[in-house]
Image: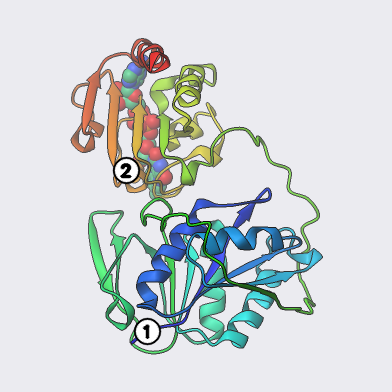
């Protein structure tokens, strides 16, 4: 049986995040040939609608309101609920991002539906679709299905391949007007520490440093390698706790979960809590002075050596490519 599926598109600084297109690809499998409706919320999102269609959405519904410029649970849930109630979908897909993790349980619980979070792949299609998600910090995978009600799912970034971009696709774009009221929070401004660089949770290449980096200045060779590779810099909690870098870079059980194509771990011992955030990376390269470090157990390539010698050498070699 085919299903009607809603996908929430996410934009940051005027551009759609890649996870929006991955969510459409997930929706395609769940729909089993049914309609895919993309939803865009914000103060000015109309111009992003065509891109969602080019990536596979059949139709786009926008809700524009000044209170949707910056995400709040209250504002977004009012707007999103209005669309979901109007569309009566069989399934709803979010990115497993900070926004998706906050909004999806709120909306699912209001509709008394189940939620399957952090889905990394989907087996089968339409009503046969089964959702696969990691459990126990990535040590095992479970396969889950929702028996009744709407399927609410969140998809982990960088795991589901987006559909091919097709700029010949067309689709209807409509807007819904929602009276957003009784907000308990209004965020006036978001001041980012740094707007530079690639978003860690969506990066294809991550160069991560641990306590072995030894200081804030010690991160500079890692920044340089990440720049050359077009990637992002991440860190272990050891490095964050030691104040070598900001906690926004932390990867692991209590930090970000990432799945890049290439993860370079430098001066990171490989504690289980760190592995929980990166062990599903496609290729892991570990650089550590200690040949017995646990990180080598999950690494595809291991370099036993001093990161301050190895990282500059790698950077120089990559610059030649
Ligand atoms: P260390 O364990 O000190 O390792 C440093 C490594 O650097 C060593 O292996 C050393 O051989 C190597 N080294 C030193 N100098 C060099 C050099 N010059 N060149 C090459 N290698 C060098 N940790 C996380 O990362 N993320 C989390 O989300 C997280 N959540 C946690 C949640 C809980 C509840 C708890 C209890 C812990 C959590 N931790 C987390 C902490 C985790 O247990 C480890 O303490 C932490 O990951 C260690 O960081 P590290 O590998 O950088 O440091």
- In this orientation, which residue lies closer to the viewer: 224 or 8? 8
The residue pinned by badge 1 equals 2
Residue at the spot 56% in from the left edge and 84% down from the top edge = 110
Residue 196 position within the rendered picture, expressed as x and y whole percent measured from the top left:
62, 33
- Please report the residue visible at 68 percent of the width from the left and 48 percent of the height from the top: 13
Query: Tag 1: Cα neighbours inside 10 Å, few (<14), some, or many (≥20)?
Result: some
Up/down of 185 relative to 107, above or below: above
Q: SS of the residue at dot 2?
A: loop
Camera sees residue 117? no
Q: Residue furthest front?
A: 168
Place residue 181 in its image quadrant: bottom right
Residue 211 % position (x, y): 41, 26
Q: Is residue 153 above or below residue 217?
A: below
Q: Which residue is mark 2?
A: 281
Residue under the point 41% across and 30% down: 207
Name the foreground residue: 49 vs 140: 49
């Amino acid at each position: 049986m085919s299903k009607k599926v809603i996908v929430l598109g996410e934009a940051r600084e005027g551009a759609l995040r890649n996870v929006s297109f991955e969510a459409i690809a997930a929706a395609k499998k769940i729909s089993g040939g049914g309609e895919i409706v993309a939803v865009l919320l914000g103060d000015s999102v109309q111009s992003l609608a065509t891109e969602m269609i080019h990536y596979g959405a059949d139709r786009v519904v926008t809700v524009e309101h000044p209170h949707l410029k910056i995400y709040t649970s209250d504002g977004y849930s009012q707007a999103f609920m209005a669309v979901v109630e109007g569309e009566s979908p069989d399934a709803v897909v979010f990115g497993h991002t900070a926004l998706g993790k906050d909004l999806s349980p709120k909306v699912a619980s209001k509709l008394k539906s189940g939620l399957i979070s952090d889905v990394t792949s989907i087996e089968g299609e339409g009503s046969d679709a089964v959702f696969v998600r990691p459990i126990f910090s990535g040590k095992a995978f479970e396969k889950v299905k929702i028996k009744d009600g709407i399927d609410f799912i969140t998809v982990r970034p960088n795991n589901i391949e987006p559909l091919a971009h097709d700029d010949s696709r067309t689709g209807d774009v409509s807007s819904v007007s929602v009276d957003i009221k009784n907000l308990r929070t209004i965020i006036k401004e978001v001041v980012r520490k740094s707007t530079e660089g690639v978003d860690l949770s969506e990066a294809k290449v991550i160069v991560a440093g641990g306590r072995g980096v030894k200081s804030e200045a010690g991160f500079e060779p890692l920044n340089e390698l990440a720049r050359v590779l077009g990637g992002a810099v991440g860190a272990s909690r050891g490095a964050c706790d030691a104040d070598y870098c900001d906690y926004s870079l932390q990867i692991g059980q209590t930090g970000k979960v990432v799945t890049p194509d290439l993860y370079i771990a430098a001066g990171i011992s490989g504690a289980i809590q760190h592995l929980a955030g990166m062990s599903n990376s496609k290729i892991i390269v570990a650089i550590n002075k200690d040949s017995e470090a646990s990180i080598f157990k999950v690494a595809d390539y291991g370099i036993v050596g001093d990161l301050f010698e190895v990282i500059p050498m790698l950077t120089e070699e990559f610059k030649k490519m």
